[in-house]
């Protein structure tokens, strides 16, 4: 919000994010807003290096979803050095950034990139095959989407495990109409060509404010009126969105998912609004419409059994669940090392969600942890049976699932729950990632 006001006062275009880099070059910046990230052209920006931010900040997530290698939290001094370099190489999988590399280093990075491309190509050849573990357990692998373009990039995805509907509300002077929302959701459903889409209702607040939906000043907006809390406080906004969702659900397989649920009363109120939307559309309840909630608040994980009778599925948003469990704000670069979703405390909440779900409620993970190959066997061992990842990662995550043996995964998950911290979890032999490092986080000393 501050940055938008300053840009407006200074007459700067809303998305002048490429002003600090030459065309077709790596973007080096202090930080980006989610709107900035969404405005970048991947064809002109092959990679992004940010002085601040963290791997689970919304801007970083959007960049990875668009296939842009991103390294965050390098610090102002190192970012300045990067901005002055004649040549910069970036590895978004390990967090390495090298300014003006010598010939052997440059050759090593090119070899690594070639190996990555070969591995990705191998995975993409099998992308449309189901993800089945070595012992025969099927795990759905979906994609997190924000647009029809994302859907078309989701090679091999079994479904859209998360559609971020808030993108249709950003950078506007007023909320989109029911017809506009219906057209947007229908376009995504058609791009998914019959595969199920999971439409998360409006999830704004925190670092995603809407100028036309102001809330009273809050000392900590991340603990304030956001997600379902804001939607229930603005019932017309929720009613219009649910009406658009129900219209599309009559023609396509659709899940509706409510974010930031902490209390059963919130869920029942949201479900009442859904019933009213169904009555407004006047065609009865869509046959394939399912209802679920995001598990992002520790209380929701611990009370999963209380929510289970009211939902068809749980989808664990590990980005927010981690921030609330560890009291580490997800966009704070000083806390990026602490805010690792493989922390045993976060894993214990995932395990609690699975227990509370019982046998009839599917448990998915749609946070960034789902795309972390070190986490895939642990999540499967905990009982997660759907992983939703960045569009370009679906094929490689399917390959990671195919390498899993369920008994070994259960042993690994049990061991992870006894570890002291996330680093110890990552050091467990079976959890070693095949690509290396947390995506986007500096994991080795900066060089150059």
Image (cartoon, rainbow, N blue to C red):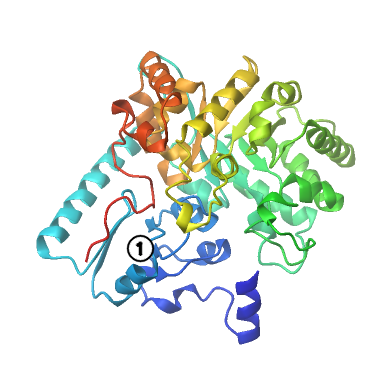
Q: Residue furthest bottom?
A: 10
Q: How many marks?
A: 1
Residue drawn at 80 percent across, 62 percent down: 216
Residue drawn at 33 percent across, 68 percent down: 78
The quadrant holding residue 163 is top right
Q: Which residue is mark 1?
A: 46
In depth, the one of 293 and 431 nearer the eye is 431
Q: Is any part of residue 156 visible from this angle?
A: yes
Q: Position of residue 332 (x, y in %)?
A: 51, 57
Q: Position of residue 291 (x, y in %)?
A: 72, 31
What is the secondary structure assignment of the residue under circle 1?
loop
Rendered position, 319 above or below 292: below
Rendered position, 389 above or below 399: below
* Image position of 58 (left or right of 222): left
The quadrant holding residue 350 is top right
The quadrant holding residue 267 is top right
Residue drawn at 29 percent across, 41 percent down: 435
Q: Quadrant of the C terminus?
A: bottom left
Residue drawn at 45 percent across, 79 percent down: 19
């Amino acid at each position: 919000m501050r940055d938008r006001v300053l840009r407006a006062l200074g007459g700067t275009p809303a998305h002048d994010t490429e002003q600090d880099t030459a065309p077709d070059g790596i973007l080096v910046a202090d930080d980006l807003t989610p709107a900035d990230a969404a405005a970048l052209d991947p064809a002109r920006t092959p990679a992004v290096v940010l002085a601040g931010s963290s791997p689970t900040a919304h801007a970083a997530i959007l960049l990875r979803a668009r296939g842009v290698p991103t390294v965050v939290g390098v610090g102002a001094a190192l970012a300045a050095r990067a901005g002055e370099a004649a040549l910069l190489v970036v590895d978004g999988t390990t967090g390495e950034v090298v300014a003006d590399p010598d010939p052997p280093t440059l050759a090593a990075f090119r070899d690594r990139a070639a190996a990555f491309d070969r591995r990705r190509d191998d995975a993409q050849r099998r992308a449309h095959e189901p993800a089945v573990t070595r012992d025969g357990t099927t795990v759905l692998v979906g994609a997190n989407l924000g647009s029809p373009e994302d859907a078309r990039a989701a090679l091999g995805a079994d479904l859209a495990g998360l559609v971020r509907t808030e993108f249709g509300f950003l950078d506007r002077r007023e909320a989109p109409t029911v017809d506009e929302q219906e057209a947007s959701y229908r376009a995504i459903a058609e791009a998914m060509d019959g595969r199920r889409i999971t439409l998360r209702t409006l999830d704004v607040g925190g670092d995603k404010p809407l100028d036309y939906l102001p809330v009273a000043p809050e000392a900590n907006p991340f603990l304030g009126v956001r997600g379902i809390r804001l939607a229930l406080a603005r019932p017309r906004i929720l009613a219009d969105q649910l009406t658009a969702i129900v219209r599309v659900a009559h023609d396509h397989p659709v899940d509706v998912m409510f974010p930031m649920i902490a209390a059963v009363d919130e869920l029942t109120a949201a479900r009442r609004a859904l019933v009213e939307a169904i009555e407004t559309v006047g065609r009865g309840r869509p046959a394939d419409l399912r209802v679920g909630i995001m598990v992002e608040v520790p209380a929701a994980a611990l009370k999963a059994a209380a929510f289970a009778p009211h939902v068809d599925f749980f989808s664990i948003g590990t980005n927010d669940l981690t921030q609330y469990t560890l009291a580490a704000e997800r966009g704070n670069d000083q806390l990026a090392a602490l805010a690792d979703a493989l922390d045993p405390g976060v894993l214990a909440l995932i395990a609690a969600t699975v227990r509370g779900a019982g046998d009839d409620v599917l448990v998915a993970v749609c946070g960034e942890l789902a795309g972390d190959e070190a986490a895939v066997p642990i999540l499967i061992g905990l009982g997660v049976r759907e992983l939703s990842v960045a569009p370009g990662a679906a094929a490689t995550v399917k390959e990671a699932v195919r390498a899993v043996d369920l008994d070994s995964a259960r042993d690994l998950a049990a061991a992870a729950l006894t570890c002291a911290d996330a680093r110890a979890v990552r050091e467990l032999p079976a959890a070693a990632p095949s690509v290396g490092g947390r995506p986007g986080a500096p994991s080795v000393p900066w060089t150059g």
